Image: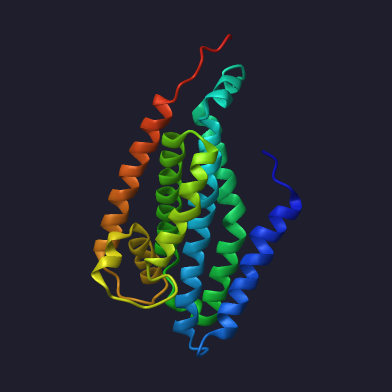
Amino acid sequence: MRIYKTFLVVNLLLMPLALLFMMIMNSNSRNPENVSYLVSGFIIVSLVSSFLGTLTSRVSNVFEPSVLELYATLPPRISTVVIAQFLTYSLLVLPQVLIGLAVIVYYQGAGRINFPLLSLALLITCIELGTLAVTIGAKIGNPYKAMAITGILPWLLVVFSPAYYRSSSPALYLNPVTYLLSCIRSAIGLQSASPTPWLVSAALTGFFLFSALRSLRSGYMLEKPF
């Protein structure tokens, strides 16, 4: 499936940046912590949308039987194709993440941000969401059926997480995105550091990574003729 330049510019730059601009302009106050709270949610939502909204569909397309037969005639292994897709969508969402981080640094100040911890939080977020997307896409194996999942799952994960609102409801901690938000917000000085979100996120990342690798190994491939 082709990805056109107009699609990239509109969906990965214009629309997200317009949303980010409206969020900042419509916030009740220009308090640095309030703005940084919203922008950190924007970063997580961008990653959720890129991986669980788009990567899942691409992976499910790869695991469709007719597409697997096509890849059986080509040199790349199925795992190589999926990793390439993961890296592609990681790079495509990178401008949104970097712009969001620039806004946070502007409002928060570089002195309040733990950059090594922030880098670790973003790495865990990308791997956790990416491997979850690969697992779901490989299990479905049909891009049309995947639309039902990609249409509602990102929405549920965003709505039932404190991405754009403050809440201490215990029910939100059933959502893995809540822990990822806690990791990022503790790294930028918005909340006190706690080992619990990091441990839970690391455990979920390991579990999803194991599931993704298992799905890649169990994918049906015809015998390569070379």
Residue 53 in sight from this viewpoint: yes
> On the image, which quarter does residue 165 sit in?
bottom left
Residue with the most extreme bottom position: 29
Where is 61 relative to 161, above or below?
A: above
Residue visible at 24% across and 62% down in the picture: 196
Where is 64 relative to 222, above or below?
A: below
Viewport quadrant of the C terminus: top right
Where is 166 relative to 3, above or below?
A: below
Residue visible at 50% across and 30% down in the picture: 63
Tell me where residue 15 appears, x and y as whole percent.
65, 66
Q: Is residue 95 left or right of residue 46?
A: right
Residue with the most extreme top position: 225
Viewport quadrant of the N terminus: top right
Tell me where residue 176 appears, x and y as whole percent.
34, 57
Residue visible at 28% across and 49% down in the picture: 203
The number of numbered badges drawn on the structure is 0
Residue 116 in sight from this viewpoint: no
Tell me where residue 100 appears, x and y as whole percent.
56, 69
Tell me where residue 122 appears, x and y as whole percent.
45, 58
Q: Is residue 125 left or right of residue 75?
A: left
